[in-house]
Amino acid sequence: MTALIHRLRGGLVLVCLLAVTACTATYDNHGYVPPEQDLQELVVGVDTRATVDDVIGPPSLSGMSDAGDYYYVRSRQRTFGMFRPEVVERQVLAISFDDSGTIANIERFGLEDGRVVPLARRVTDNSVVSDGFLRQLLGNLGNINPFGTNNDDSGFGL
């Protein structure tokens, strides 16, 4: 009887350990921001876009136009168990250029400098949702034109 109790107790301890280790936080890193020592090599008002490309590399994200600013973005997310991932760190390095292509400003922003931006999802309404599969299938039986597309109402394409 005592052997059964020891086995049950050992099984319970094993299940508790598995449950605790399953809830360990995992971290995901995305993006790249150059280190501060690399940025010290850049001089505002002197260096150009080509110098930035050589010293710290081109960004994965730039402004909308060909002469747009450079944005380096890095974020770190923590996922804890079954909960939604949470952004725990975000850095944005913005390098802006003037009209001649030289560096006008270098700015660094963190998660504390930002604000939540709600993204709107605009979806085109379609009629497929309102009709079932059989209605769609059977509704097209009379609409077949074997001769191709034609605008006359006869359906014969002549």
Image (cartoon, rainbow, N blue to C red):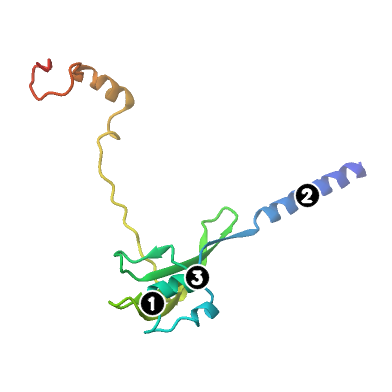
Q: Residue at x 29, y 77 (%)?
A: 100
Instruction: Give whichever of discs 1 and 2 has the lower sequence position.
Output: 2
- Residue 71 location (% of width, % of height): 41, 69
Q: Nearer the viewer, residue 96 or 5?
A: 96
In the figure, 56 relative to 147: above or below? below
Q: Residue at x 38, y 77 (%)?
A: 48
The answer for how far apart the CA atoms under marks 2 and 3 are is 42 Å
Please say whether residue 151 is visible from this viewpoint. yes
Q: Residues within 10 Å of mark 2 (few under 14, many from 20)?
A: few
- Residue 106 location (% of width, % of height): 41, 79
Please say whether residue 93 is visible from this viewpoint. no
The answer for how far apart the CA atoms under marks 1 and 2 are is 61 Å
Closer mark to the observer between disc 2 and disc 3:
3
**For mark 2, what is the residue?**
14
Residues at marks 3 and 1 touching, judged by CB atoms closer than 8 Å = no
Q: Amino acid at mark 2?
A: Leu
Q: Nearer the viewer, residue 152 or 102?
A: 102
**For mark 1, what is the residue?**
48
Q: Residues within 10 Å of mark 1 (few under 14, many from 20)?
A: some
* Quadrant that contains the N terminus: top right
Q: Nearer the viewer, residue 92 or 105?
A: 105
* Quadrant that contains the C terminus: top left
Quarter occupied by residue 131: top left
Q: Name the element at disc 2.
A: helix
Relative placement, left or right, of 5 versus 23 is right
Instruction: Give whichever of discs 3 and 1 has the lower sequence position.
Output: 3
Quarter occupied by residue 92: bottom left
**For mark 3, what is the residue?**
33
- Residue 86 location (% of width, % of height): 51, 62
Q: Residue at x 36, y 65 (%)?
A: 117
